[in-house]
Image (cartoon, rainbow, N blue to C red):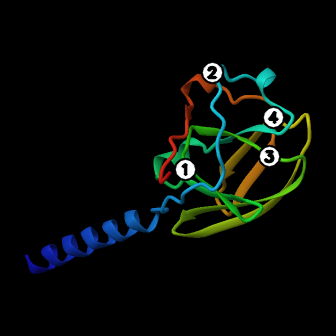
Amino acid sequence: MKILKFTKGIFLVSTILMLSSCALKSIPSDYSTVKLDIVNTESLGNGKVLIYNGAGILHSADNTARLNVWVDAKSLGQIKAREYLIVDLNKGNHEFKILHIDMVNMRSTHEININENTKVIRLEPTITSNKATVTNILPDNFDKYRYRIEHNK
């Protein structure tokens, strides 16, 4: 009986530690976001860029899809799965640093060139790092995405 209680205790503590280790603390944004009445690719470009979290179902299911993002060493804040935001970025090269936690910190740095044709950037966690891709198209099922709520402002 004591072994069963001990095993249950170990299992409970392990589960709590595992679930809390995947928590990524939200960071405030140093960027002002742009809110558009109608979001489509025609309303983007010339520095106005939509950035979204394209995390897949596996990262969403285990709550490791949240991304903390910095652009040129300034915080862009946290973007959760199926969230997006729109920011004005100057034309030229920008350094995107992305962090997500999946038992350990997964950091990556990406160089992205913003020009008059840059409209949409997809960020996503991967099993070993993160990925940043200029797609210039809205994601499938974009109507299910939500605009990121501003925190700590």
Residue 122 percent coordinates (x, y): 72, 42
Q: Residues within 10 Å of mark 1 (few under 14, many from 20)?
A: some
Q: 114 above or below 116?
A: below
Tag 2 near tag 4, CB within 8 Å: no
Residue that numbered label 3 is attached to: 89
Name the residue rendered at 57%, 31% in the picture. 145
Q: Earlier in the sequence, mark 1 or mark 3?
A: 1
Q: Earlier in the sequence, mark 3 or mark 4?
A: 3
Left or right: 41 in relation to 27: right
As rendered, which of 84 and 4 lies closer to the eye? 84
Q: Earlier in the sequence, mark 4 or mark 1?
A: 1
Q: Earlier in the sequence, mark 2 or mark 4?
A: 2
Q: Kindly state the secondary structure of the residue where label 3 is placed.
A: loop
Q: Which mark is residue 34?
A: none
Q: Which mark is residue 37?
A: 2
Residue that numbered label 1 is attached to: 59
Residue that numbered label 4 is attached to: 119
Residue 138 percent coordinates (x, y): 72, 28
Q: What's the amino acid at mark 3?
A: Leu
Name the residue rendered at 55%, 64% in the picture. 101
Name the residue rendered at 86%, 37% in the picture. 118
Name the residue rendered at 36%, 71% in the picture. 17
Q: Kindly state the secondary structure of the residue where label 1 is placed.
A: helix
Q: Residues within 10 Å of mark 3 (few under 14, many from 20)?
A: some
Q: Residues within 10 Å of mark 2 (few under 14, many from 20)?
A: few
As rendered, which of 124 and 27 lies closer to the eye? 27
Left or right: 74 in relation to 112: left
Q: Residues within 10 Å of mark 4 (few under 14, many from 20)?
A: many
Q: CA distance from mark 2 to mark 3?
A: 19 Å
Tag 4 near tag 1, CB within 8 Å: no
Q: What's the amino acid at mark 1?
A: His
Residue 22 seen in this snapshot? yes
